[in-house]
Image: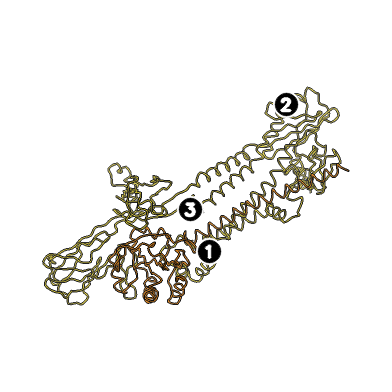
Amino acid sequence: MREIKCDACHHINREGTELCESCGKPLVEKQQAEGKETKKLLNMRYDGSSRRSMTYNKSVVDRVWNFFSSVKVGVTLIVITLIASAVGTILPQQMYIPQNVQPEVHYKDQYGLIGQIYYQLGLHELYSSWWYMILIALIGISIIIASIDRVVPLYRALKNQKPTRHTTFIQRQRLHSKTDDVTDADKHTFISNLKRMRYKVTEDNGHVLAEKGRFSRWGPYVNHVGLIIFLLGALLRFVPFMYIDDFVWVREGETVVVPDTNGEYFIENKDFIIETYGDSEEDTRFKEALENQSGPIAKNFQTNAVIYRNVETVVGAEPQLEKFKEDSILVNHALKFDGFALYQTSYQLNEFKSMSFIIHETNDADETELASFKVDLTNPAEEYQLDNGFRVMIDQYFPDYYIDDGEPRSQTKNPKNPAFVFLVYPPDSSEPEVSFAGIGRNVDASGENQYKVGLQDFEVRDVTGLTVRKDYTLPILGLGGIIFMIGVIQGMYWQHRRVWIHPKNNGLWLAAHTNKNWFGIKKDIEKAIMKTNINMVVDQEQEEQELQKQQEQNK
Amino acid sequence: MSKVEEAKKQKRNKKKKRLLFRSIILLALLAALIFALISNFNNDEASLGVGDQAPPFQLKQLNGDAETLNLADLEGKGIMLNFWATYCKPCEDEMPYMQSLYPKYKDDIEIVAVSVDATQLVIDRFVDNYNLTFPILHDNKEQVMDLYNVGPLPTTYFINPDGEIVEVVSGPLTLERLDGYLQQILPE
């Protein structure tokens, strides 16, 4: 490692140092503020100390380290991730397509060639793809290493500050003034005024450094720590113990297993309630608003549910349920048990539960009932013995009837559009008549049936859709968020202000620097030099800009 | 002279420390990355995958003589565990293949078909229609489907005589592929 000796104070600096750590004298020729036209001012970034990664570049570890330490690399990674994330929104992700279809078929059918390419490139599950995860992880790594690489030298530079600064350093600060004659009393007033404004003052042989708000410099790093904790929390979401996000449909009166509880918990839907505005008396005050709406406005969705614990250990065997908790689930009122929470997220109204049919003579215009039977759609019986010697067998049952290539089929297992093929045995006959009956359908298969089966009535029930969630990562995400915010506030609302006093013959030179809010530090100095004959600092950047403007005008 | 050497030694120490520090941080970050990738991969493949032990369960059997079937009772035999439903067309397509191969492998391999249909009636009709003789089970509470974390239907698990999952197939099977998978789970 090469070292740089400051020719003014003989302090030994590490390679890459731009301003002497001890006296602040520029060690490199071109040391000047970036992006500024003026060549006069110093670049005070990281106080001119060397960022470690820029100094040596030797072993593999160092090379990797230096790669991630670069802000350019970090920004590039972020931009790539942004573009990738945008691509993922072009077509719906796999989790948003219907559950009962094969994705490869769905994307091709719905979106044609583009959909097929999208699927084959794996973009249908982009956000959980390995390369996307690696991108996010690389950003995390970049944040961590870049932070470590900058916070350490900066901390050292700020900790080892000496009040004595080289005249070049003083002259090339943005705020600077020279006063030829200053009495000790004036200097003392100035310093004690600064102290009153809660500047921390260190003195060394007449040289003075007054400083306040240094902790605001750590804001960005605190912010990054928060971000890293947040990323860690997001990472833990992949551990099933920490995070579960699932969904379950429960029909009224039904008891089903709560997914992802290893069959330990069951949920019964006692009742699903949906209320709309305008139903009750107190809603009359909303009358006008409601009239402007095209449909009814929901006021409440509610599932009255019971949670059971299954003490039977063999999965699939008839569960032995013990009541665990009973509660109603409303929007923003989840049912919580054993780390799990059930949220009201969806519903389906009026699914068929049972259907009643009557048998009448085909040519009877009055459809006089000869026999009737009720089919429980949750568990239809095979055979029904009826009055007047009738017997009905269910030959086929289609819970969700549709015609596929001329063949009747069921689309799902749920009774959304139930239809039956009945075998009707008339009294004293072993030859059945075949009848097809469903909602709005009543087909006589042979055309010669003596009896007809007609739908008389039906019962319906509601289905509630619940999100099943377990999330132990929330406290971690919350902590990360809070720390993030503290970092932002720390860096935003405080500024690191420094004032240097450099005695020169009978007078003194003044210089000041702040990382933001130059107006504020000027005010501070103005107040501090009141009633003294110390000259107010001049904003050299502003001065130069005005000078340039004038020159342009003169041309 | 000794001062220079001391300084050099100090420098070396510093360098060593730095290398150690950087290596540890990079290794920790790499470990976190690998952890994230592996857990993500496992999530995709459902919680049960190749190499896992097939979790035992017991379900009502709808055909044959037995009332229930317990997977643990099939120890020593290969098991083809098929999740299906009557309304699922690809499931329907592969049923005849399963039935045609069943007699040949019957003594060594049990084909267990778990239906996730809601009602027994539709399954009974289906079984009668295709004359299925291998055990048909009814998972009406979706307990076993949840246990195996089954996504789209059909999904088939091929389990060797030691109870270890050898293959997971999501989607329909052809006769040749089915035969090949069954060969893999034959007892020795």
Nearest to the observer: residue A44 or residue A454: A454
Q: Amino acid at mark 1?
A: Leu
2 or 3: tag closer to the N-terminus: 3
Location of mark 2 (residue): A530
Q: Secondary structure at mark 3?
A: loop
Read off the residue under disc 3.
Answer: A240
Question: Circle 1 is placed at which residue position?
Answer: A123
What is the distance, in whole Å, between disc 1 and disc 3 at their CAs? 24 Å
**Which of the image's four quarters has the N terminus of chain B?**
top right
Callout 2: chain: A
| Residues packed near mark 2 inside 10 Å, few (<14), some (14 to 19) or many (20 plus) | some
The CA distance from mark 2 to mark 3 is 66 Å
Q: Nearer the viewer, residue A165 or A356?
A: A356
Give whichever of discs 1 and 3 has the lower sequence position: 1
| Spatial separation of the CA atoms under disc 2 and disc 1 | 67 Å
- Give coordinates of residue B57: x percent, y percent: 38, 59
Q: Position of residue B121 (x, y in %)?
A: 27, 66
Other residues around mark 3 within 10 Å, as few (<14) / some (14–19) / many (≥20): some
Chain letter of disc 1? A
Colour-to-chain, yellow: A
Kindly identify the amino acid type of the residue bearing the numbered disc 3: Pro
Circle nearer the N terminus (2, 1): 1
Q: Image height check: is A112 above or below A243? A: below
Residue B52 relative to residue A149: left or right: left
The chain coloured orange is B
Residue nearer the viewer, A449 or A190: A449
Q: Secondary structure at mark 2?
A: loop
Horizontal side of A144 relative to A507 (left or right) equals: left
Task: Give coordinates of residue A229: x percent, y percent.
Answer: 57, 46
Q: Residue at x 74, y 33 (%)?
A: A499
Q: Amino acid at mark 2?
A: Met
